Amino acid sequence: MKKFITVICLMICTIALVSCGKKQDAGGSDRKTFTVGFDAEFPPYGYLDESTGEYVGFDLDLAAEVCKRNGWELIKQPIDWDAKDMELNSGAIDCIWNGFTINGREDQYTWSVPYVDNSQVFVVSASSGIKTKADLAGKTVGVQKDSSALAALEDEETPENIELKDSFANLIQYADYNTGFMDLEAGAIDCLALDIGVANFQVSQREAGAYVILDDKLSLEQYGIGFKLGNEELKNTVEKTLLEMVDDGTFMKIAGNYSDFGLTDSVCLGK
């Protein structure tokens, strides 16, 4: 009899835990925390402020305001970018919010509305003599693993990008762009392909005029918040709050804090 009662109790506890887990997946009042997965070396969207030791950035600021308005605790969870799907599908994070490109991934996630118009660009040393994409033929180009820039270069539906990639002497993939810029500074690579917001930030942190962003764009795209496929309830709650922030001016106020990196020109919500 005691064993029977013990088994019943264990079953009840298990059901209760599962139920709580489902509530945590929901976007309603039962949620206590909101865990954002982000690349900690992707400024100005998410990065480590070395002066404070805190993770900061445009996307994290937006997430913090969303949490404040919903009574959630924001948990900032740095992730390896090429492990983002595992983190999301396992429930370790609630969303990917970090300059996350919608284009080409439309059916892989449940997406918020787009909030930034982005482009992939090329950064080179000002003394390199490289002026256009055509000048990259025979050069060594760097890109982040599993990034939108890499996806654009490998997009079979864009033959001109495939031809461009095939013209490179080498295409080197990095875990993060800080390492890529170190190699660019050292002359180990001739060019980096990356998001324009990150490019603006990285160039601004170095000697004025030392690096330039080519006028030729690799691709145009939009950023959104990516949730696990099917998690409509949480997406709707976050999106509703984000749109309220647009309506009352908070969204553009936060973007204004990053105007030096072109974000006020790049955001597409509320325009």
Image (spheres, rainbow, N blue to C red):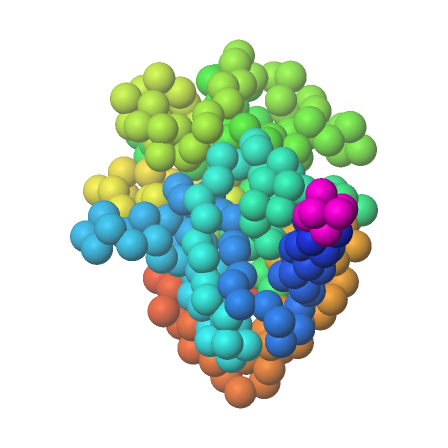
State the image coordinates of residue 47 (x, y, percent, origin top left).
37, 49
- Residue 265 falls left or right of residue 43: right
Instruction: Specify the quadrant of the image occupied by residue 87.
Output: top right
Instruction: Specify the quadrant of the image occupied by residue 163.
Output: top right
Q: Does the magenta stretch include residue 5?
A: yes
The vertical placement of 31 against 194, above or below, is below
State the image coordinates of residue 226 (x, y, percent, origin top left).
65, 53
Instruction: Work out whether residue 95 can be spotted.
Output: yes
- Residue 237 falls left or right of residue 118: right
- Which residue lies at the image location 44% right of the left edge and 44% below the top edge? 78
Asked whether 57 or 2 is in front, the reply is: 2
The vertical placement of 170 against 259, above or below, is above
Q: Quadrant of the C terminus?
A: bottom right
State the image coordinates of residue 19 (x, y, percent, origin top left).
71, 59
The vertical placement of 182 against 194, above or below, is above
Asked whether 62 or 233 is in front, the reply is: 233
Asked whether 203 or 160 is in front, the reply is: 203
Instruction: Specify the quadrant of the image occupied by residue 235.
Output: bottom right
- Which residue lies at the image location 27% right of the left edge and 46% below the top edge? 205
- Residue 146 falls left or right of residue 264: right
Write down the region rendered in magenta.
1-6
Q: Is residue 98 magenta?
A: no
- Which residue lies at the image location 61% right of the left edge and 64% below the top edge? 115
Main secondary structure type of the part rendered in magenta: helix
- Which residue lies at the image location 43% right of the left edge and 33% below the top edge? 176
The vertical placement of 188 against 66, above or below, is above
